[in-house]
Image: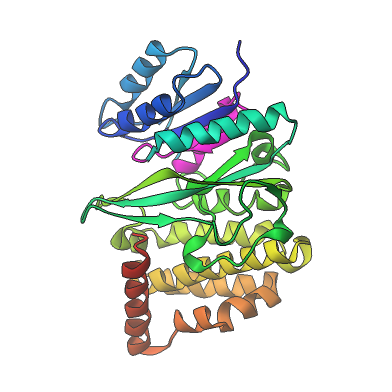
Amino acid sequence: MTQKILSFGIPCFNSAEYMDRCITSILEGAKYAEDIQIIIVDDGSVRDNTAQKADEWEQRYPELIRAVHQPNGGHGMAVLAGLQAADGTFYKVVDSDDWLDKDALAALLDKLRQSETDNEHLDLVISNYVYEHTADSTRNFVSYRSILPVDKIFAWNEVGHFHMWQNLLMHSLCYRTDVLRANGGTPLPAHTFYVDNIYAFVPLPRCERLYYLDVDLYRYFIGREDQSVNETVMAGRIDQQVRVTRIMMKSYHLYKDIKSVKLRSYMVNYFIIMMAICSVFSKLSDHEDAMDELAKLWNDLREYDYRLYRRCRWGIVGVATNLPTKLGTKLTMGGYRIAGKVVKFN
């Protein structure tokens, strides 16, 4: 059996309408090479023929594609199911409504193969991603060429400053599989959206040898009304956002555990944004206990890591997203929506 260089995990939940494009983009970009693996995880789909499609894909390409079926457990459980089944040296998650650029994928695979031949032992390969907006047929490119060294192996102390719209999201990350499995694995909870934040946060300190491939690989579909980043949907799922943020908080004492100053700075800024999102959408939510749960989250942070609490709560972002009174809430939401129009993240 051919050793797999890269396994793709594709979480699918009632995805029959669009999963074919995702799978096809990987097969064509990889030129149907024997050293890739696609793991289609049917996460208890019942409203369409996702499960049947997954099996049909496996039957067509049994050496390249594996179908995994499980009771519905949510996005995180599907990611972990793919990881458990992965035979590849590296692992990348591609959501079923997204796709990969074919030329960029070919470049990624060439780099991964060469790095293993040269025994470079990369822990993380980073690439760019693109927001594909269906409503107005526009694209928003997110790149790291102003932040990361290009075409060389580097460590965290060599990175530049990340702007808030340049965070390393799941779309930009290709981990060594062993990194994701180390230290007890990656703590993704069941039946919870927004776990991609955990996936893009918790494993980072395990990565010592990094490489940035300056290609626009991941195409992130934006536009469905039921999408998890839709503003109304996020407000309705604020309890899940809080759950994810608390897991990220408890993963490290950032000022004590993270030795690299630049990695620590990046992770602190990422967490500041997570607390800001919780603050903004707690105000928008119609959950009766949303503001009480937000207060509890802030209190837990204060008790767990007081230094981080001060940075999150009393920095510019924390103050701006926690303004008192109804007028303060309107100002906060106005700022959030302006940012959304500029960066176009939802």
Which residue does the image show at 55% across and 31% down from the upper left?
109
**Percent of width and height locating residue 229:** 36, 56
Colouring mode (rainbow / by chain / secondary structure / one colour) = rainbow
The one of 75 and 224 positioned closer to us in this rendering:
224
Judge whether residue 81 is colored magenta.
yes
Residue lying at 40% horizontally and 38% vertically, measured from the top left:
101
Q: Toward which corner of the image does residue 333 lie, by quadrant?
A: bottom left
| Horizontal relation, residue 45 to residue 251: left or right | left
Image-based side of 147 in relation to 102, left or right: right
Q: Which residues are magenta?
A: 75-98
Where's residue 338, x and y in %?
A: 33, 74
Horizontal relation, residue 320 to residue 307: left or right: left
Please say if 184 is above or below 301.
above
In the picture, the quarter occupied by the C terminus is bottom left
Closest to the observer: 163 or 188?
A: 163
Q: What is the x, y in percent for residue 129? A: 44, 49
Viewed as shown, does residue 105 lie left or right of 222? Answer: right
In percent of width and height, residue 161 lies at 60, 67
| Image point (54%, 36%), residue name | 108
- Up the image or down, 62 lies above or below 157; here it is above
Residue located farthest toward the front when viewing the structure as drawn: 151
